[in-house]
Image: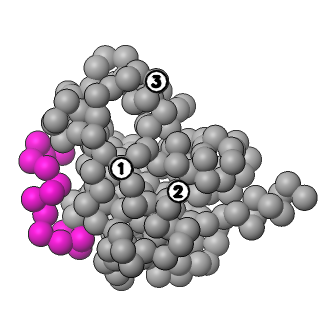
Amino acid sequence: MSHQSIECEPSLAAALRRVCAGFDDVGASLAAAVEETAQSMPAPFDQLLCHSNHMTTTLGGFFGVPVCLRVLSERRSADDYCRQILLTAGPDGPVVEFGIARVNLAFAPEAVRDAILEKRTPLGDILIAHQVLRTIRPLWFLRAPAGSLVRYFGADQPAHGRVGTIYFHNEPAIELLEVVMDRRSELADSRA
């Protein structure tokens, strides 16, 4: 991962290419993504994405259950660590987020680095638990067409997302793609 911030990318398309690098299937799936603004984001996605909080706490609050992590794939080269993930609403609930995190482990304290590499806890929960001084900066918002990420969500509906950076002590430590889908109806069905 470049130590230059993703904020230097000139467009959503360029930012997506950078974050999705090495995950060509995701980049191809999101090639038709449309840029949105915080003001144009429809409900409930405005509530889910247009903030500078961790998605783990936001999604957990929205769906009423803690989210659980599933790592789909990962790559590591020295301090550059990248992974594709799914977050589910509870251990057996539907997928509520697909994401890619590109982490510069050089900026992470050792306990945080170890917890990330254990692949058991969502990233936001790790940073909160370890009280890492951080700033979350969403940079672009997007709408992914229906069907573009169906293999991750198991549902053929539009999804919305954001691309951004998490800074540790003012250093750009993590670049993120976070795409969410409203799965409240599936949760309601499973609780009935």
Task: Write down the region rendered in magenta.
Answer: 1-14
Question: For this rendering, which residue is in front, 43 or 155?
Answer: 43
Could you classify mark 1 by the number of other residues whose Cα lies within 10 Å: few (under 14), some (14-19), or many (20 or more)? few
- Disc 2 marks a residue whose amino acid type is Glu
From this view, report whether residue 26 is shown above or below residue 70. Answer: below
Going 15% across and 57% down the picture, which residue do you hit?
7
Question: For this rendering, which residue is in front, 65 or 25?
Answer: 65
Q: Secondary structure at mark 1?
A: loop
Identify the residue position indicated by label 2 in the image. 97
Going 40% across and 21% down the picture, which residue do you hit?
130
- Disc 3 marks a residue whose amino acid type is Ala
- Disc 1 marks a residue whose amino acid type is Ser
Mark positioned earlier in the residue sequence (3 or 1): 1
- Horizontally, residue 136 falls left or right of residue 4, namely right
The circle on residue 6 is none
Quarter holding the C terminus? bottom right
Could you classify mark 3 by the number of other residues whose Cα lies within 10 Å: few (under 14), some (14-19), or many (20 or more)? few
Residue 67 appears in which quarter of the rendering? Answer: top right
Could you classify mark 2 by the number of other residues whose Cα lies within 10 Å: few (under 14), some (14-19), or many (20 or more)? many
In contact (CB < 8 Å): disc 3 and disc 1: no
Q: Secondary structure at mark 2?
A: strand
Quarter holding the N terminus? top left
- Residue 21 is situated, as x and y percent measured from the top left of the image, at 26, 59
Identify the residue position indicated by label 3 in the image. 129
- Residue 110 is situated, as x and y percent measured from the top left of the image, at 31, 17
Question: Mark 3 or 2, which is nearer the eye?
Answer: 3
Residue 10 is a magenta residue: yes
Identify the residue position indicated by label 1 in the image. 52
CA distance separating discs 2 and 1 = 16 Å
Going 32% across and 74% down the picture, which residue do you hit?
37
From this view, report whether residue 186 is shown above or below residue 99. Answer: below
